[in-house]
Image: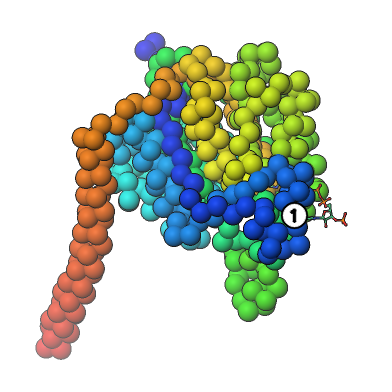
Amino acid sequence: MSANHHQRYAHIVGWGKYVPPNILTNEELSKRVDTSDAWIRERTGIRERRIATKETTASMALYAAQEALEVADVNPNEIDLIIVATSSPEYIFPATASIVQDQLGAQNAGAFDLSAACSGFVYGLTLAAGMIRAGTYNNVLVIGAETFSRLLNWKDRATCILFGDGAGAVLLQGSDEYGGILSTVLGSDGSGGELLEIPAGGSKNPTSLETVMANMHFVKMNGREVYRFATRVMVDAIKQALQKANLPLAELDLLIPHQANTRIIDYAAKALQLPPSKVFVNLEKYGNTSAASIPIALVEAIEDKRVNPGDHLVFVGFGAGLSWGACALEWTEPTIKRITTPQRAAQSKLRYGWANVKSMGHRVLRRVDAGVSRTLDRIEGHSNDNGNGK
Ligand code: UT7
């Protein structure tokens, strides 16, 4: 280790969320499939969820990211890397993160998507924190964004009642001050892959008339097995993250778990003897928003004044893969939202408007450039032909 080596820490300095305004209640769902409000509430805790109408995964990710940057008071061109954790990306490629990078005008940022389903946000934090602690990058945007409503079979009551759409984002920033992400734990058990999957549309089962007819492009789940897996890994992952951070369980102030099912969360809370005041739950409003659930919950926990500087938090996620992840952190940032003056709001509007104009400019220029290059090549080809002919 060199003499001037600083220990770097990755702190959450900005946070934001977006959920579509369109609400789908259990009551409304029970008119579409054979279910009831009572069943859904009793078995899952969900009352309603948000369903995207005009929104897409990228547009929701963008809104959440813009809010996180406002809170952090960081300019998009200071971002080094954008990670979008999603299992419902806009396309197989390009990455949703690149679309967000363009629309933010984050011209100095690398961007990629991360596929780890409901564990994706914790995986993203792990990567971002590692890069910051290594000194590779200083400002990393980690976004969880999902539009599962477009991947659900709305005739399958076992899955369509569970999921909702939304996005959450945090900006991680490097500092020499102790705190921020203290430890992370990641896990995977691919032998359980078929318990929660979208069987077709990838390279193994490419889209065909048969795959479409067989409903293979929708989420397919063995709920009971995923439930058993979730309760099995969650408690261990939380304990491991705390242990790696040298924190006794008694010093945990708030657990922010992946919001899939209140019964799963209650099971973990009971096993760890955590009182309800130390566990954040908001899934009654949003259902399971997969990779977006933890960052959305974090933003709401902050809004509810349940996160304060000095607090120790644990995030824990689990889902398809099978995969899981937990992360222990010490919160360091004041949570009183910085007041957005009309002048700053106007500045932001101008900045994102300008990013859009520039992006459009780049697209036009690329087309013109391609056209001109083609013409030049043709002329050159002709003159070469002539030269060869003589
Ligand atoms: O991010 C990770 C994503 N996945 C999860 O977190 C899912 C984890 N699993 C679960 O949350 C639960 O397994 C479910 C909520 C999906 C299901 O609850 P369960 O208590 O495990 O129910 P079950 O699958 O054992 O089904 C019980 C009964 C069945 O009827 P029979 O076979 O006992 O006659 C189902 O057909 O409930 C029936 N059922 C429903 N009834 C009304 C299943 N879905 C519904 C429904 N409405 N929507």
Where is residue 60 drawn, in percent x and y? 44, 49
Q: Which quarter of the figure has residue 73?
A: top left
Tell me which residue sits at (55%, 52%) in the image. Answer: 23
| Quadrant of the image containing the C terminus | bottom left
Residue found farthest to the bottom = 389
Could you tell me if residue 35 is visible in this image? yes
Relative depth, front residue between 20 and 66: 20
Tell me which residue sits at (35%, 48%) in the image. Answer: 101
Relative depth, front residue between 354 and 109: 354
Element on which disc 1 rests: loop
Judge whether 191 appears above or below 264 on screen. below
Query: Mark 1 belongs to which amino acid?
Result: Ser
State left or right for residue 223 relative to residue 152: right
| Quadrant of the image containing the N terminus | top left
Where is residue 365 drawn, in percent x and y? 20, 63
Judge whether 219 appears above or below 320 on screen. below
The crowding category of the residue bearing disc 1, from other C-alpha atoms within 10 Å (few below 14, some 14 to 19, many at least 20), is: some
Tell me which residue sits at (14%, 79%) in the image. Answer: 379
Find disc 1 in the rendering and name its residue: 36
Where is residue 216 drawn, in percent x and y? 67, 67
Where is residue 304 drawn, in percent x and y? 52, 27
Tell me which residue sits at (37%, 12%) in the image. Answer: 4
State left or right for residue 269 relative to residue 101: right
Q: Which quarter of the figure has residue 262?
A: top right
Total labels: the figure holds: 1
The colouring scheme, among rainbow, by chain, secondary structure or one colour, is rainbow
Q: Is mark 1 within 8 Å of ligand 1?
A: yes
Could you tell me if residue 195 is visible in this image? no
State left or right for residue 287 relative to residue 270: left
